[in-house]
Amino acid sequence: MREIGAGYYDGRTSRRTEVRVVFYRSGEVRLAGPDIEQTFRLKDLTISPRVGNTPRTIELSGGAKCETLDNDAVDAVLKEQGAAGAHGLVHRLESRWRYVAVALIFTVAFVWGFVTYGIPSLARQVAFAVPPEVDDALGSGTLQAMDEVFFAESQLDAVTRERFVKRFTTMTQGLDDGHAYQLEFRASEEIGANAFALPSGIIVVTDELVQIAEDDDEVVGVLAHEIGHVVHRHGLRTVLQDSAVALLLAVMTGDIASSSSLAAALPAALAHAKYSREFETEADDYAWHYMREHNIPAEHFAAILTRMGEGEGDEEQEAGIEDYLSSHPVTAERVKRFTAEAD
Amino acid sequence: MDTRLGSAVSIKSLQFTGKAGEYFKIWIVNILLTIVTLGIYSAWAKVRTNRYFYGNTILDNAGFEYLANPVSILKGRLIATAFFIIYAVVGQFMPLAQIGFSLVLLLLLPWLVVQAMVFRTRNTSYRNIRFGFQRRFGQAAMVFIVLPILAGITLGLAYPYFQRRRHQFMMESASYGNTRFEFAASTGSFYTIYLAAVGVTLVSLVVVALVAAIAAGIAVALLGGEAALQQGANEQFGAIGAVMPMIFMPLIYLALFAFVKAKTTNLVWNELTLGPHGFTSELKFMKLFWLYISNTFAIILSLGLLVPWAKVRMARYRVEHIRVCVAGDLDGFIAAEQANVTSTAEGVSDVFDIDIGL
């Protein structure tokens, strides 16, 4: 038999009575204290699951409870009577460091695997299962907004624009993926030489990009890269992947509006940047294949990439810590690819 | 704090007996089992976490107990997830419908807040007597819809008044057994806190601006020397000037948040009474600010592994600075008649469980 000290609370008032509780091997439980003498069968009692070393509650009949700090004795009684149950299992997992270490390793591996492979894979499947009209909804309003803030009307002459529109049409006419491809030109001093793709298929090229290009095929390379973003539905996949990461973080930290939300912003940003770099590489792949298929020398893309990078002081050759937050792979790496493969 | 004549008043502190190492093990197993069960275990994880924190909060030799049924919580989470998915999907195809959805949610907010409080308080007991929360939906609508709009219209001037009304609503709807809580703070004391907060912010901004200017000046001098001071100074100044706000603005925001939180928590506890008993709280703003910062850095640097340590640390600080001014003893409370809460309402409202931060 085992005996423990406990506080008895009748559930009608908040008064505490000190009692001794005796557990017999027969399954009988006797409660004794000033003005109290009660007998129960262990199986009629509900004992709370052990959580760390918090006070253990023994529910008696009639709404009364006993509260004891002697968790070990209660565990021993339950074990003897064969009544440990599932909660005992969870507590065992929580109390041995070796299980905890396994749990830690598994969790880390799972999270890393899920974020690196699981989420992108799921997002890709969902994105392609969804109709292209969803992409249109994603980008709508962006061009108007950018026109108000960054863009001015293009100053290129009509002949130049017509030339590129023609090339663009040949690039997109066979695609048949539900997107309404359209080439737009804008002038932008703040942005400089660049190009954007909206998920709907509208691709915007700045005057400055056309101006720094030394060959039409350089612009074609950039167009191919942007078309790649649309074909592969990167806009939608970005939204899906970012949401999945946010949900994962919320589940892991246990709350939606967490006090550690500042700390959660960093992993979310890192994940977003990583996904962004992967999409840029996938768009580069599309450009590379397009250029190869149409016998356009790959160096053209490398050349214009380098020239675009020069304006931004993007000359480092090796990846540094800050590149983990970068949305694009290191320019030097991208350039290397388009010049090496050409050989 | 009010002392009633006739009973000897003793000051009893609360203790927090939780330990970081112990909680870490519970926390990691919670995450593991949640992942393995695709989220189903999260309801049990929440119950275990709350039992750990409540159970380790000790007053006068007795702990608090969290009594919620994990199954109700699970049902609630499943329903909430279904709503969220519908909301997201509808939003993709009919953005206008999503606005309608949000509006409905806003109108339901008072109801949700009350239900969440009912769920949480009725599932909390001390010495086998449950806490309770009155359902006063009309008051809730006033406090959670009308007053925030008022605060917005007045560009924040009515915000302290809104906070006073909100805390009053929360405290005076709450009860322990048959005894209702009472809250005596005046609107003026809330305005004092917020005015002081504005002052603190202004001082911080000035300090930050000075530090930034000095640092930038030193940096430019070190990096460039005389020539740079004339030519490129502007560029470097600008670069440093751009980075400084990114670091300091979150810090200032956090300081402001810690200040208001500490002062408000102290005010609320100090003006709260339960029958003949009173409470005091003396959180220090600087200490709370330091806790927030160090916890955030610890969590980031440990890639999240120090989350349990941070939670235990914060809980310990907040619990151990509350004291109860007990008139006589704590034996005099009587249980209230319990009405039943439907489990759907319980579970769904749990998802909106709002941290009242006491």
Image: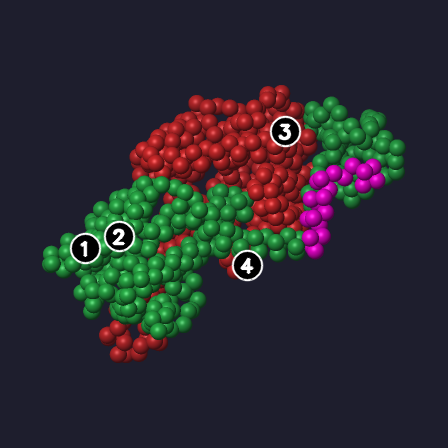
Chain colours: A green, B red
Name the residue beneath numbered marker 3.
B130
Check residue B302 in the rendering and tell me which mark sits there, or answer none. Answer: 4
Q: Where does residue B221 sit, x and y in percent of width and height?
A: 32, 75
**Gap in angstroms between the C-alphas marked 3 and 4:** 39 Å
Query: Does B155 appear above or below B257?
Result: above
Q: Quadrant of residue B58?
A: top right
Name the residue beneath numbered marker 2.
A172
Query: Which structural element holds mark 4?
Result: loop
Query: Which structural element holds mark 3?
Result: strand
Which marked residue is nearer to the observer: mark 1 or mark 3?
1
Labels 4 and 2 in the same subunit: no
Residue at 30 percent across and 47 percent down: it is A176
Which marked residue is nearer to the observer: mark 3 or mark 2?
2
Q: Which residues are magenta?
A: A79-99
Location of the C terminus of chain B (image quadrant): top right
Which marked residue is nearer to the observer: mark 2 or mark 1?
2
Q: Where does residue B175 sit, x and y in percent of width and height?
A: 57, 28
User: In this view, which residue lies farthest toward the bottom?
Assistant: B226
Which of the two discs, 3 and 4, labels the residue nearer the N terminus? 3
**Gap in angstroms between the C-alphas marked 4 and 2:** 48 Å
Residue at 69 percent across and 24 percent down: it is A12
Which marked residue is nearer to the observer: mark 3 or mark 4?
4
